[in-house]
Amino acid sequence: MFDKVLIANRGEIALRVARTCREMGIRTVAVHSTDDRDSAVVSYADESVQIGPAPARKSYLDIAAVVEAALRTGAEAVHPGYGFLSEDPDFAEVCRDNGLVFIGPPPEVIAQLGDKTAARGVMARAGLPLLPGSLDPLGSASEARSLADDIGYPVIIKAAAGGGGRGMRVVHDAAEFGRAHRETVAVAQALFGDPRVYVERYLATARHVEIQVLCDRHGNAVHLGERDCSTQRRHQKLVEETPAPGLPRELVERMGEVSVAGARAVGYVGAGTFEFLVGPDGRFYFMEVNTRIQVEHPVTELVTGLDLVRAQIEVAAGAELGLRQQDVVPRGVAIECRVNVEDPERDFAPAPGRLVEFSPPGGPFVRVDTHGYPGYRVPASYDSMLAKVLVWAPDRPTALARMDRALAEFRIAGPGVRTTTAFLRRVLAHESFRAGTHSTAIVGQVLDEQHGPHRAAG
């Protein structure tokens, strides 16, 4: 096992990784920007290294600075968390070249699955069902338009190198395709340095369901069940839960089986997530693989009793899973709500500031993953998520009541600070969510009912 791990991230995930490392007797190194010198993980970790100024490209995305910090402090492994460099194959390769263990899949696997068209191709060959669309990047606007016309509208244009809900555009008819294509190509180039895009059919009322997989270096692979992530705004998840309400168990089990087959097909190692769309007809379609720990991984932990970060670290150190598929027996219901410092009344504009009051909820079966504390200044430089509120219960009605109570208890206040807690309570109270019949359109429905149709487009 490792003696020291560098955590190449910030916020709640950095603190969450550090806590598991402490339980395992592993010393930790926290890297941070100038804006994060007062962050919770800097105080918690055994060591800390400032790696650059506030802009992420000059700190958390600076591969040389992160690797130098690891080597200088004697770290043996690097945990990338999620976001930033977690799905960068170059980072994983540089770690390997410098004798550092990257806690995640091999760089070749990250590169293959990070290219969405390449991933679609390999998963199609592994037997996973795909939505109609291109298996290769499309070379020109006319080629993309021709394919969209053949598929039938609506379609979605996606960046081949995209991820995290960015670099995609829904097109409802042929008249808007040209402009949408140009804009998506420009965004893909700006965000990912890669202008390639592809097109596939768009399901307007689909469920977004993902399967958690866990694989070791010895050929063992299992899935840990599903998470429903349908509650989204601009393709960014707000609420996640397991089990997915209303989905037949045989459908979920089939999704798990094909996910394990897909993981084996690419030689996957570590924790990863296969993402699917489930149509109104009950058919499911592969979207992509996230080659990292997910923001919503704790819901799976709550129903399985497994520490996924610990499993990541053990697998990276060469251990076997010691877990067979029949050993995975999820129990109860878990729900996660992401609390962001955003103002829903101003089109979810970021609303950071200093936290004068910060009092997370408690009580039975409530878990809060956060890096916030009274007096903490939430930086404007990074993602707006401040906390994840999670609950477990033996059944969904109890879980919903527990989550509503927990969100109502959360006290966050400071000059200019606004959060999404009240909006999340409205989503959870919505008739379709409570009935378990909601789709990826639910946030727009809640906004429509609150403010009128003109707000839902945001």
Image (cartoon, rainbow, N blue to C red):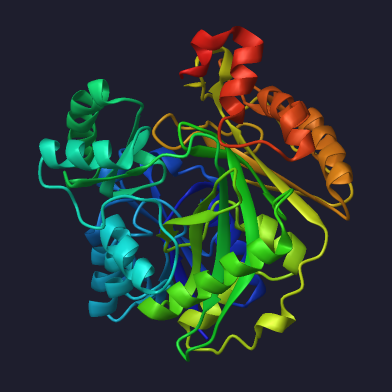
**Is 43 situated left or right of 61 in this image?**
right
| Relative image position of residue 400 (x, y in whole percent) | 82, 39
394 or 418, which is in the foreground? 394
Above or below: residue 13 compared with residue 251: above
Residue 85, above or below 189: below
User: Could one spot residue 300 in this view of the protein?
Assistant: yes
Q: Is residue 69 left or right of residue 366?
A: left
The quarter of the picture where residue 360 lies is top right
In the picture, residue 180 is in which quadrant? top left
Q: Horizontal and vertical percent for residue 382?
A: 42, 37
Residue 423 position within the rendered picture, expressed as x and y whole percent measured from the top left:
67, 23
Depth check, front residue: 364 or 326? 326
Tell me: 13 left or right of 226: left
199 vs 430, nearest the viewer: 199
Residue 183 position (above or below residue 256)? above
277 vs 60, left or right, is right
Question: Can residue 354 be seen at all in this image of the molecule?
Answer: no
Can you give x and y, in whole percent of width and height, for residue 457 in the image? 46, 18
| Residue at the image point whose x is 38% and y is 59% from the top | 86
Q: Say above or below: 289 vs 33.
A: below
